[in-house]
Image (cartoon, rainbow, N blue to C red):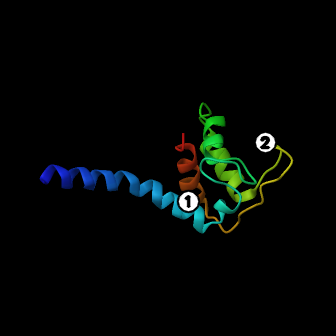
């Protein structure tokens, strides 16, 4: 019984950060154009993570794109600026996106 409770606690603890960042992405309207595993209007978060997997400056690049928007990287459709997203939240989102391998 004790092992089962420990396992459940560890399992729930491991899932909590992923759920929290998905909640943040949802609250900032990221999920209107993106999904974790499939292309919507913009690329999936897994595609973004794969593209930037060897780029040590990826977090900083994504923070700028999240807040200021961008174009030309994923095709002709631009990503709009998101000035409602703070730099701190953009960093959390970027780190989470890059972890969705």
Image coordinates for residue 12, horizontal then vertical, percent = 33, 56
Whether residue 54 is situated above or below residue 70 in the rendered picture: above
Residue most extreme to the left: 1
Instruction: Please state if 97 lies on the left or on the right of 44 as rendered.
Output: left
Residue 86 vertical placement versus 58 (above, below): below
Nearer the camera: disc 1 or disc 2 = 2
Screen quadrant of the N terminus: bottom left
The circle on residue 9 is none
Q: Quadrant of the C terminus?
A: top right
82 or 24: nearer the eye?
A: 24
Residue 3 position within the rendered picture, expressed as x and y whole percent measured from the top left? 16, 49
- Residue 17, position in %: x, y? 43, 55
The local crowd at label 2, few if under 14, some if 14 to 19, many if 20 or more residues have their Cα within 10 Å, is few
Q: Which mark is residue 73?
A: 2
Q: Residue at x 58, y 61 (%)?
A: 25
Looking at the image, is mark 1 or mark 2 earlier in the sequence?
Answer: 2
Q: Badge 1 local density, few (<14 within 10 Å), some, or many (20+)?
A: few
Q: Which residue occupies 47% across, 61% down? A: 20
Relative to 41, 90 lies left or right = left
Query: What's the distance in space between the residues labelled 1 and 2, CA to CA?
Result: 23 Å
Callout 1 secondary element: helix
The answer to which image quadrant residue 84 occupies is bottom right
Under circle 2, the secondary element is loop
Q: Is residue 1 above or below residue 28?
A: above
Write down the residue under mark 1.
88
**Would you say the residues marked 1 and 2 are in contact, meaning their CB atoms lie under 8 Å apart?**
no
């Amino acid at each position: 019984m004790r092992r089962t409770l420990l396992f459940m606690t560890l399992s729930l603890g491991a899932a909590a950060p992923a759920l929290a960042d998905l909640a943040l992405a949802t609250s900032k309207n990221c999920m209107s154009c993106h999904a974790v595993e499939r292309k919507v209007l913009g690329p999936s978060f897994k595609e973004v993570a794969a593209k930037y997997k060897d780029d040590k400056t990826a977090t900083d690049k994504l923070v700028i794109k999240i807040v200021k928007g961008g174009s030309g990287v994923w095709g002709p459709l631009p990503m709009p600026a998101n000035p409602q997203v703070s730099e701190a939240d953009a960093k959390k989102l970027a780190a989470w996106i890059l972890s969705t391998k």
